[in-house]
Amino acid sequence: MHQGNQTTISGFLLLGLSNQAEQQKLLFMFFLSMYLVTVVGNGLIILAISLDSYLHTPMYLFLANLSFADISSISTSVPKMLMNIQSKTQSISYESCITQMYFSIVFVVIDNFLLGVMAYDRFVAICHPLNYVTIMQPRLCILLTVIPWALSNTVALTHTLLLLPLLFCDSNTLPHFFCDLAPLLKLSCSDTTINELVMFIVGASVVTVPFALILFSYICIVRAVLRISSTEGKWKVFSTCGSHLTVVLLFYGTIIGVYFFPSSTHPEDGDKIGAVLFTVVTPMMNPFIYSLRNKDMKGALRKLICKKRFLPLMCWTSDFLLSPKPDG
């Protein structure tokens, strides 16, 4: 379709992570394995929280939402990449590309907000334990669940509406494994100044606001823990937020490592590396972090697996993996 000297395109070509034919089979097996681990691991967490009434608390409500977001995040990009590798094609339609971009933004942003909400929950539990039930009422918990989803969709919709009027001329090749916002803006032959400005302002807000809430919460938590006289008491209180703190360090450590210390030799690979870490590695690691470091979650997963009489081997395996190991 022609508009003056310009040609709008009907689809894009995704170059993927490598253009070496001999590496495609290895990439397929590697990402398929990570995808299955992520879906099964986060799915088990959601199922365990749903079926175990002991876990029907605000903290695990937020964790279930985080697990759902992680499954959705990896599902926006990896299945299409696997299909392209298997079919030896690189094409994606314009509509599918925009849809993929929209949902990839939603689930990266929701992770930011949910980590902030979970930090606030730990702050209330540790710094105001006597008022926890009063503060974290069902109505507030629902709001703290719904608002992040609403904000993340608003952010994604803003970027999408600003992207739709842009024209893509002769080139339709994306040096990426899925349709990400930044590579699409680089590919456009329209003026993207407004898009880049909004991306910077909104992106900075999405990262800094939840991070500020997390930082404030943990400063208050550390102060509360330091007021406890016994070492055992300090460790017991602080261990209740150990899993969340690990996920925060992984998530924001990835942001700092990729975007503040980019590779000087291959700066064009920064977007790919960041996308893999955000959409594949972090969602895959979260179930291990929460199941291996959380006593209640380990118990719920063990009960969920052992409830099935036809899975004795899995039950034995879960007891071996999830049970506490002796020191040394």
Image: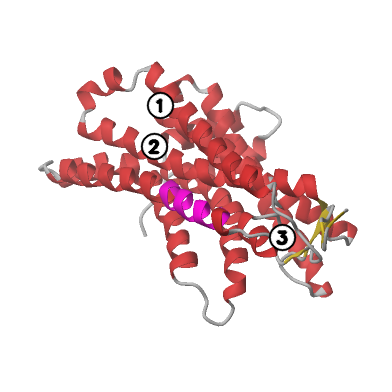
The answer to whether one can see residue 154 in this image is yes
Residue 155 x %, y %: 53, 41
Q: Amino acid at mark 1?
A: Pro
Residue lying farthest front?
Answer: 4
Residue under pointer 1:
58
Q: Tell me: residue 106, above or below residue 304.
A: below
Query: Which secondary structure, mark 3?
Result: loop
The residue carrying pointer 3 sits among few (fewer than 14), some (14 to 19) or many (20 or more) residues within 10 Å by Cα, namely: many
Residue 5 x %, y %: 82, 63
Q: Is residue 42 left or right of residue 58?
A: right
Between 178 and 74, the one lying in front of the other is 178
The residue carrying pointer 2 sits among few (fewer than 14), some (14 to 19) or many (20 or more) residues within 10 Å by Cα, namely: many
Where does the magenta region start and end?
195-206
- Label 2 vs 3, first from the N-terminus: 2
Q: Quadrant of the C terminus?
A: bottom left
Q: Are marks 3 and 1 in contact (CB under 8 Å)?
A: no
Q: CA distance from mark 3 to mark 1?
A: 36 Å
Q: CA distance from mark 2 to mark 1?
A: 9 Å
Name the residue rendered at 40%, 26% in the picture: 58
Residue under pointer 3:
177
Q: Amino acid at mark 2?
A: Met
Q: Is residue 293 magenta?
A: no
Name the residue rendered at 51%, 40% in the picture: 110
Residue 104 x %, y %: 62, 47
| Quadrant of the rendered image containing residue 256 | bottom left
Q: Are marks 2 and 3 in contact (CB under 8 Å)?
A: no
Secondary structure mostly seen in magenta is: helix
- Label 2 vs 1, first from the N-terminus: 1
Residue under pointer 2:
118
Q: Is residue 11 left or right of residue 148?
A: right
